[in-house]
C-alpha cells in the first residue's frame, strides 16, 4: 500500500510568528503514523527546520529553479532548499504554471534538478474549469504526468498530487466519482511508467480540503492523503485533517 501523507502548502503566507503553529502541530502529533510535510515560504524553512528538530515532520519548498546556481535573480535552487533543511519540494502547482508560465518541459527540468539535490518531489497535476467542461480532464492529466516525470525517477522519492485548478481555494470539491476517476487514471499511468513500484507512489488530493470534508475524501479509492492549502496554516485545522487520515 502507498504511504499516507498529509502535506501543507503555506503558499505566500507566514512569518516568524507562524512558527508557533509548528510547535502546536508537533505537540498534537508526536507519533502521527502518517507522513506530514509542511511547505512554508522559503524564508521560514531554515528556522522551521531548527524548530522541528527530530520531530516526525518533513519540510519542503514550494518550487525550485532547474539550475543549481546562476544569474537567476529571485529564484531558489533545489540545492539551496536542501541546504536550508528541506527534504521535499512542490513542483508543477497550477499557480506556478499560471503565474510564472511553467510548462511541462520546465517542470521536468525542475524535477530532475530536485532529484539531483536529493529532494523528494510532490508533483502537481490538474485541469482548469474550461478543460473539465470540454471533457479534457484525463487528456490534460495524462499529458502532465507523462511530460513532467523523468524516465529515471525514483518512485520512492515521488508523491503525486491531483489538484483540479477550479477547486483550489474556491470551496468547490469534485464529487467522489470524479476524484476516483482521475486518481485511478494517475495510478494506471504510474504503473505503466514505473512498473509495480508505481503502485507504491502516494497520490494526494488537493483543492479545498478542510476538516469537515477530509474523511469523505480519504475514503475514496486511490486517495492516499491530501495537499492542503488554507487549512494547513493553522495547527488546529490541519491537525483535524491529519487525524482523519490516520483513521482512513
Image: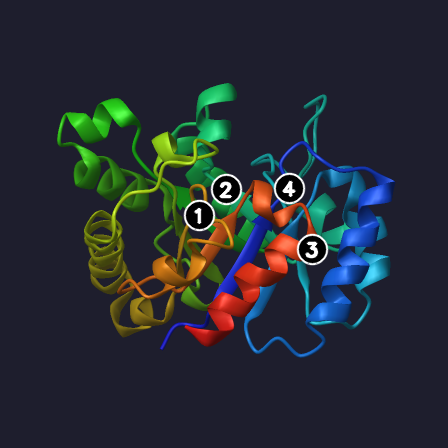
Q: Judge by depth and name the residue closer to the eye, 100 or 109.
A: 100
Give the residue pinned by disc 2: 91
Q: Secondary structure at mark 1?
A: strand
Mark 3 crowdedness (10 Å alpha carbons): few <14, some 14-19, many ≥20: many
Q: Quadrant of the N terminus?
A: bottom left
Q: What is the spatial separation of the Cα atoms under label 4 and label 3, in whole angstroms?
A: 12 Å
Disc on the earlier residue, 2 or 1: 2
Circle number at residue 235: 3
Q: What is the spatial separation of the Cα atoms under label 1 and label 4, in whole angstroms?
A: 16 Å
x, y percentage for residue 130? 24, 22
Marks 2 and 1 close (CB-CB < 8 Å): yes
Q: What is the spatial separation of the Cα atoms under label 2 and label 1, in whole angstroms?
A: 5 Å
Q: Residue at x 60, y 64 (%)?
A: 36
Q: Judge by depth and name the residue closer to the eye, 106 or 33.
A: 33
Q: Secondary structure at mark 3?
A: helix
Disc on the earlier residue, 4 or 2: 4
Instruction: Say if residue 118 shows up in the picture.
Output: no
Amino acid at each position: 500500500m502507498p504511504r499516507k501523507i498529509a502535506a501543507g502548502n503555506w503558499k505566500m503566507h507566514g512569518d516568524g510568528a507562524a512558527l508557533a503553529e509548528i510547535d502546536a502541530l508537533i505537540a498534537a502529533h508526536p507519533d502521527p503514523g502518517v507522513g506530514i510535510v509542511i511547505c512554508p515560504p522559503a524564508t521560514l524553512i531554515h528556522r522551521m527546520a531548527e524548530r522541528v528538530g527530530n520531530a516526525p515532520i518533513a519540510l519542503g519548498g514550494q518550487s525550485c529553479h532547474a539550475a543549481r546556481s546562476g544569474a537567476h535573480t529571485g529564484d531558489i535552487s533545489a540545492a539551496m532548499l536542501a541546504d536550508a533543511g528541506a527534504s521535499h519540494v512542490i513542483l508543477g502547482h497550477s499557480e506556478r504554471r499560471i503565474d510564472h508560465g511553467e510548462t511541462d518541459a520546465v517542470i521536468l527540468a525542475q524535477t530532475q534538478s530536485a532529484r539531483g539535490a536529493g529532494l523528494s518531489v510532490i508533483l502537481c497535476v490538474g485541469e482548469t474549469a474550461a478543460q473539465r467542461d470540454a471533457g479534457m480532464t484525463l487528456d490534460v492529466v495524462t499529458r502532465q504526468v507523462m511530460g513532467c516525470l523523468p524516465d529515471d525517477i525514483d518512485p520512492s522519492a515521488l508523491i503525486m498530487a491531483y489538484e483540479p485548478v477550479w477547486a483550489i481555494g474556491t470551496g468547490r470539491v469534485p464529487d467522489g466519482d470524479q476524484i476516483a476517476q482521475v486518481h485511478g487514471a494517475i495510478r494506471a499511468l504510474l504503473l505503466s511508467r514505473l512498473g509495480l513500484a508505481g503502485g507504491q507512489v502516494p497520490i494526494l488530493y488537493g483543492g479545498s480540503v478542510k476538516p469537515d470534508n477530509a474523511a469523505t475524501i480519504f475514503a475514496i479509492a486511490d486517495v492516499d492523503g491530501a495537499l492542503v492549502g488554507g487549512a494547513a496554516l493553522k495547527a488546529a485545522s490541519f491537525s483535524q485533517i491529519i487525524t482523519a487520515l490516520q483513521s482512513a
